């Protein structure tokens, strides 16, 4: 499994536009093969900060997602100009241990 996430700030006044773009992105990503989980979040303490989270089955699914028409072109194009580039943090992660049930 591969996880990718990104966090970023949008320019003040563009929060609603970012929400629309991100919700559209989630709906498109859900349709892609190999995408297990896709979610977006908005910070409770800093409403201009957003977090994107994806779980993908393997490196091939990750490559396919990164080059998909929607992800590779549209989302970055739509967000361009409304996000603060210096705030963008993007990374990928590999799962270290198999999934276990959460024990309280």
Image (spheres, rainbow, N blue to C red):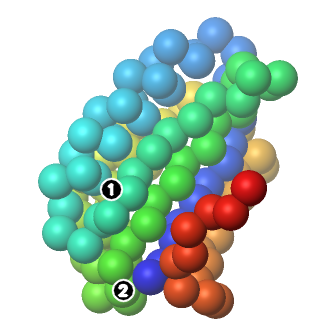
Residue at image position (58%, 35%) is 41
**Is 90 drawn above or below residue 18 in the view shown?**
below
Residue found at x 25% / y 73%: 34
Residue, disc 2: 58
Q: Quadrant of the N terminus?
A: bottom left
Which of disc 2 and disc 1 is earlier in sequence? 2
Q: Residue 103 is drawn in which quadrant?
A: bottom right
Displayed quadrant of residue 56: bottom left
Q: Is residue 83 among what the camera can see?
A: no
Q: Position of residue 73 (x, y in %)?
A: 31, 54
Disc 1 target residue: 71
Q: Where 63 falls versus 6 (above or below)?
A: below
Q: Please tell me which residue is depicted at 57% across the width and 17% down the height of the picture.
A: 14
- Residue closer to the observer: 7 or 30: 30
Q: Of the numbered discs in the image, which one, if any, rests on residue 90?
A: none
Mark 2 lies on a secondary structure that is: loop
Whether residue 64 sits left or right of residue 51 in the image: it is left
| Residue visible at 33% across and 56% down in the picture | 71
Q: Residues within 10 Å of mark 1 (few under 14, many from 20)?
A: some
């Amino acid at each position: 499994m591969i996880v990718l996430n990104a966090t970023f700030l949008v320019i003040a006044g563009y929060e609603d536009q970012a929400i629309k773009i991100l919700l559209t992105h989630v709906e498109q990503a859900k349709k892609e093969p190999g995408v297990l989980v896709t979610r977006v979040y908005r910070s409770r303490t800093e409403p201009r900060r957003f977090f994107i989270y994806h779980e993908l089955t393997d490196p091939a699914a990750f490559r396919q997602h990164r080059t998909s028409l929607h992800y590779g072109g549209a989302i970055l194009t739509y967000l361009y100009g409304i996000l603060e580039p210096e705030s963008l943090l993007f990374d990928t992660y590999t799962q270290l241990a198999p999934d276990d049930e959460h024990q309280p």
